[in-house]
């Protein structure tokens, strides 16, 4: 369906926007958005295909379900950031923050503690 939405984007976008905004303002998430096609996917190629434990379920959600999730995430992120509700060192789910910046920050804290003569431990 995503190809259809992309092809007719100019015509459909006002209706999609209205649907998603209505869902967010009312707190109602259409039941059709909650349905997924679940398929088994082999964890590794070399695993025995006859063993069910070697598979993991993969859920394929509808295009509109994925889009509504992305819209909700962006709005929540903007709200949290504009109201300074995100911890300064929060790395997950933020642009320009990664595990690399988190590790660098922890490493820096360890170096500063060592300079002060403090003992540090990382778990």
Image (spheres, rainbow, N blue to C red):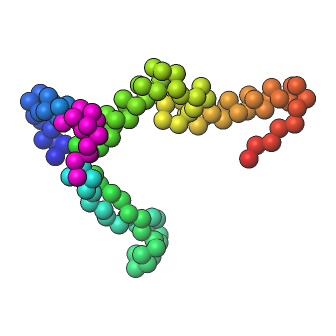
Number of disc labels: 0
Residue farthest to the bottom, as pictured: 50
Q: Image check: 37 left or right of 75?
A: left
Task: Write the residue at 26% across / 45% down.
Answer: 29
Q: Where is residue 24 in the image (x, y as percent from the top left)?
A: 28, 35
Query: Is 78 drawn above or below residue 39 in the view shown?
Result: above
Main secondary structure along the magenta-highlighted residues: helix
Q: Image check: 109 left or right of 37?
A: right
Q: Where is residue 69 in the image (x, y as percent from the top left)?
A: 33, 40
Q: Where is residue 97 in the image (x, y as percent from the top left)?
A: 54, 30
Query: Is 42 drawn above or below residue 98 in the view shown?
Result: below
Q: Can residue 68 be seen from the camera position used here?
A: no
Kindly indicate the quadrant of the structure image that contains residue 113. Answer: top right
Residue farthest to the right, as pictured: 117
Task: Write the residue at 19% across / 43% down.
Answer: 2
Q: Which of 21 and 15 is in front in this view?
A: 21
Task: Write the residue at 88% across / 25% down.
Answer: 116
Q: Can residue 7 be seen from the camera position used here?
A: yes
Q: Image check: 9 left or right of 116?
A: left
User: What residue range appears in magenta?
Assistant: 19-31
Q: Position of residue 96 (x, y in %)?
A: 51, 27
Q: Nearer the viewer, residue 25 or 116?
A: 25
Query: Is 106 drawn above or below residue 84 in the view shown?
Result: below
Task: Write the residue at 20% across / 52% down.
Answer: 32
Whether residue 24 is in magenta: the answer is yes
Kindly indicate the quadrant of the structure image that contains residue 41. Answer: bottom left
């Amino acid at each position: 369906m995503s190809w259809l939405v992309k092809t007719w984007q100019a015509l459909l976008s006002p209706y999609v926007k209205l649907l998603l905004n209505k869902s967010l303002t009312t707190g109602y998430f259409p039941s059709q958005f909650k349905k997924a096609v679940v398929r088994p996917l082999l964890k590794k190629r070399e695993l025995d295909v006859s063993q069910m434990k070697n598979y993991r379920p993969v859920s394929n959600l509808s295009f509109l379900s994925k889009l509504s999730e992305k819209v909700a995430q962006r709005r929540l992120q903007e709200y949290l950031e504009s109201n300074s509700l995100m911890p300064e060192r929060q790395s997950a789910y933020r642009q320009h923050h990664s595990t690399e910046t988190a590790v660098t920050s922890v490493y820096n804290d360890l170096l500063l503690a060592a300079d002060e003569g403090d003992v540090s431990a990382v778990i």
